[in-house]
Image (cartoon, rainbow, N blue to C red):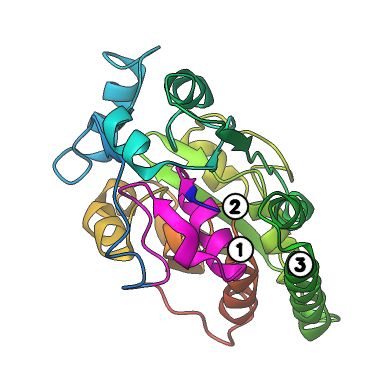
Amino acid sequence: MRIVSLLPAATDFVATLGLLPSLAGRTHECDWPPGALDDVPVVTSSTIDHDVLSSREISAAVDGEHRGSALYSLDAALLAEAEPDVVLTQDLCDVCAVSYRQVSETVRTLDGDTRVVSLEPRTLDGVFSCLATLGEVLGVPERATSEARLLRERREAVRGRVAGRPRPRVAAIEWLDPLWPAGHWVPEQIEAAGGVPLLAAAGEHTRPITWDAVAEARPDVLLLMPCGFPPERTKAELPLLTGLPGWDDIPAVHILDGPAYFNRPGPRVVDGAEILADLIHAPSPPTD
């Protein structure tokens, strides 16, 4: 079976299922496992230069000139060369990956019988269910069942590790300018790690908020995990927040690797919960 993944989280799933040798195409953002994807053809590109534009400029581009248009380009010729049996995509967020409509329209032009599978988890249980679904689609149901069970067991182990401890109030931010609270599965990661999630509910697709809303929530811990940004990029934009009223009143601020552990609905969301359990219960959490 030949697989093309048009979603970084889907590539993570493929790796977890031991099917990387079957991966015939991937996105330009797929980066895990490190070094394992170097020889896999890249079939997408971004129409926005994220390395040059600021958070505000990226948001303006998304809401302005790109409103209603594709933020990502899918190379139909490369996709055809990959000869996929299965294309993995999503219909949850057009800002995060190639849109489902774009994928479906492109696949219809291909020769052969290519199946398009859309992954749309909004919660941790949804992530685990996606793994089981992929296992059935890709012919490894027993492996998928086993891996999903291990992920659930690790989540429960995190809950057990923090049981009985004080539960700090935790706010998570997935974009800095404008400010977006992290929704979907992130509140569940915080809850599993022994915190009280603020600003968003489990499974919620959030909207921009003001800094006043963050300050008024009185977080004990503030997590910065901008979507698609490595920690170094987040640190470079930190001055957007540090001068705001109430910033110095937040006891602990942490800059996290959003793409690796929090932004993508793949198996590493459990790693994210484990990381948070250590961070938010540290005796004296440092300010990054």
- Pick the residue in front: 105 or 239: 105
User: Which residue shows up at 51% across the image and 32% down it?
Assistant: 209
CA distance for labels 3 and 1: 12 Å
- First along the sequence among labels 2 and 3: 3
Image quadrant assignment for residue 152: bottom right
Residue 78 higher or lower than 105, as above or below: below
Question: Mark 3 sits on what residue?
Answer: 148
Question: Mark 1 sits on what residue?
Answer: 269
Give the amino acid type for the residue marked by disc 1 in the picture: Val
Q: Residues within 10 Å of mark 1 (few under 14, many from 20)?
A: many
Q: Position of residue 140 (x, y in %)?
A: 71, 63
**Part of the protein shown in magenta:** 4-33
- Dot 1: element: helix
Question: Mark 2 sits on what residue?
Answer: 265
- First along the sequence among labels 3 and 1: 3
Does residue 12 show up magenta in the picture?
A: yes
Q: Position of residue 273 (x, y in %)?
A: 64, 69
